[in-house]
Structures are given as structure tokens and as C-alpha cells.
Image (cartoon, helix red, strand yellow):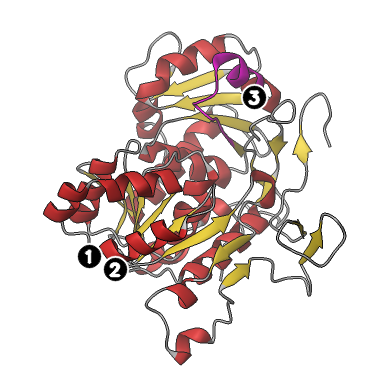
Amino acid sequence: MLPDNLGYLFDTALALTPSKPAVLQGDAVLTYAELDARANRLANGLAALGVTAGDRVALLFNNDVRFLETLFGTMRLGAVAVPLNIRMGDEALRYVAEDSEAVVLVANAALAERGRMLAAQIPAIKHVIADGPAADGALAYEAVLAAASPTLARRATAFDETCMQPYTSGSTGKPKGVLLTHGGQLWNADIMRKALVADDTERALIAVPLYHKNAMAGAVKPFLLSGGSLVILPGFDALEVIRAIDRYKVTYLTGVPAMYKMILAEKDALGRHDVTSVRYAVCGSAEVPEELLEEFRRVFGAPIGESYGLTEGGPVPIVNSRLELGRYTDAEHHTWGFPSYAPLSFDRPEPINHVARDGSEDHDESEHQMDDCRTCRSCRTRENQT
């Protein structure tokens, strides 16, 4: 049974394998029990600062396990996590943080200074929590956790309560806050888990930004839900990815075509390191050339599935089923019922309609209309709260 709050995504793994690694980053290993306790401490720390259900908490992180602690802790409290795109310029980042009406900003050590400077420009942000020593009015992250209890009384969470408010890129205007719900995101994570055939033997490598939906929807949510482990890299470097596959015995990769091209170009490193643990990979953001699919399968002995996602879509409406592409080809696994290219909208009889732009039945160029429980409730800006 799925929990009612996305912050408790890994309840099953916590109950069955509390001492199993949930997250590995460098030499640090965080078990499911430790991740749970630290998320609770973060929630209690926020509560001590006056954060309540419905309040916004801005997350300013590069790839860091503390992002996950803050994300889950915020949602457990009933507050809404606002992951900030650190690649935005200062003006755009200020707009998003101010528009979100965040009352607390949490940052890791690498972005602590930027976080303090950002918060100083936004009166609504009352507190800054940053990894590292307390400075310039910011609270020290580890001190906040140390002062808080590792246990937390659960609050009942409605299916359609907002859990996250990521922002669109703003390519067609100002960035808009996308209101994603606990129930919808849990439903999507479960469907992705099934489509990826993820289980507790998996180790997913994350080299894409954690705040981006490629990482969140393509790795964090389905693999923690399944009881697997996450391996987090600070960022993408083809050589480091290859080394990490060997070191941590990674079974799953997520990325974009350019990343896979750069990995495959490192032929010497691929020859020196054992990458046979890889079982499956998923690629998003752009179409994958056939030659790339073939070379990846030849080098890794594993297929690449393709996915399409968008922030408003919750965000993955379409993804290849691993059952049709990978090593799972027996009749028992086929009872899952996923087609080769699975529309992840199973709560409506006909969730995706294909409409050719010229009105004909030629679907080479088409629009896909999706409506299900994990699409966003609405897009929110202070100027036009729609």
C-alpha cells in the first residue's frame, strides 16, 4: 500500500530493510533508517521555526543527499517543497523564490552564500538554513537537525494536497509554479516503478541535477519506492560515471543523449572498468539516435528506454516499458501488461488522444493530450494564480 504523503515514499523499505543503504554519495552511506530519522529531524526543525502545513520551503542545492532529507522532511510536515533551478541567473532565481512565497530557504554548503544573498532580497523569507557553520544570520543545517527529534507524529494527508511546487523554465513567459499533489506523485512513482521493473536489488546512478524531474521522476521516486539504492554524483562527468558504475555496481542509469554519447566516447575507461552491472538505462529530453541505442547495448549489454516528460505532466506521461526492451521477456513478467511504448495514464479509458496537426490521420507530428491524477492541479504565479 502506498503512503498518503510523498515524504514517506520509502515506508516499505524502512519497515523491511532499515539498515540497507538508501543513498550513497562518495564515501558516505545513508541507510533507510538514517534517511528517515534525518527527514524527521528536518521536519521538526522547520516546525520549530514556525513552518506549518501549506507554507513554502525553498530548496537551493546542487546534488547532495541533504536535498532529499529536506525534500522529504518538508513534505512530512505538510509544507510545500520548492526546488530551485540553480542554473538560473540571479534575477530569474529571485523571481521564482519571491513568487513562491517561501518562508524558509535551505541550502547546502556549495550554495550557502548564494542562498543568504538571495534571502536578503526577499522579505518573506524569514529563515535561512545552510550546511556549514552558522554565518550572516543563517542557521547551521546540522545544528538544526541535532536539536530536533528523530521521531515525528504523522499527519493525515489528503490525496490532492500540494507537495511540491517546481517551476517551469519560463520559455513562454515568466516561470510558473506547478502544483503537484501527494497522491498524484505517489501514483506516478508507482507506475514508473512498474514500467522500470524496479526492485530492491537496483542501484540507480544520478548524475543529472537532483532538482530536475529527470532525476526525481526517473530515479529518486521509483527506486526509493522499490527499496533500491541511489548513487549520487556531484554532477555529470563521463569518467566519473564509469568509475561509479564499477565502484558501486550500478544497475540503472538516467540521462540525456549527449551524456550517453560522452560516456561511450571514453573507450579506454570503459575497457578498464567493469560496467557489466548495468541492466537498463532511460534517456529523456531528446530523441535517441538508433546508432546510439545500438552502441550502448553493444558496450553495456543493456538497452536504453526513452521517456517523455514535462513539469506540468507530473512529469512522465510516456516511457518505454523495460519488459519489452530488456532482459525480462518471460510470460510471467508480461502479465504486467505494458506495451512497448507505454502511456503512463491508466486511470482513464482513453487518457491520450493523438491529434494530427493538419487534422489528418498521419500521426508523424501529433499533439498528445493527457489528463490524469498526477498532472498538476494548476500553475501558480502571484500575478495570475490559475
Q: Position of residue 127 (x, y in %)?
A: 53, 19
Whether tag 2 and tag 1 are in contact, CB under 8 A, the answer is yes
Q: Which image quadrant for residue 192? A: bottom right
Mark with earlier residue (3, 1): 3
Which type of secondary structure does the marked residue at label 1 adopt? loop
Whether tag 3 and tag 2 are in contact, CB under 8 A, the answer is no
What residue is at 43 percent from the left and 68 percent from the top? 198
What residue is at 64 percent from the left and 47 percent from the top? 310
Q: Is residue 23 magenta?
A: no
Q: Position of residue 205 (x, y in %)?
A: 34, 52
Q: CA distance from mark 3 to mark 2?
A: 43 Å
Observer-nearest residue: 11 or 192? 192
Mark with earlier residue (2, 1): 1
Observer-nearest residue: 336 or 296? 296
Give, as a three-letter code, the residue at label 2: Gly
Vertically, is 263 above or below 171? below
Q: Which residue is mark 2?
A: 301
Observer-nearest residue: 90 or 308? 308
Q: CA distance from mark 2 to mark 1?
A: 7 Å
Label 2, residues with CA under 10 Å away: few <14, some 14-19, many ≥20: some
Q: Which residue is mark 3?
A: 96
Q: Is residue 237 left or right of residue 95?
A: left
Can residue 377 be seen in this snapshot? Answer: yes
Which type of secondary structure does the marked residue at label 2 adopt? loop
Give, as a three-letter code, the residue at label 3: Val
Give, as a three-letter code, the residue at label 1: Thr
Which residues, given as a range, are shown in magenta?
Answer: 82-96
The dot on residue 276 is: 1
Mark 2 against mark 1, which lies toward the viewer? 2
Mark 3 against mark 2, which lies toward the viewer? 2
Whether tag 3 and tag 1 are in contact, CB under 8 A, the answer is no
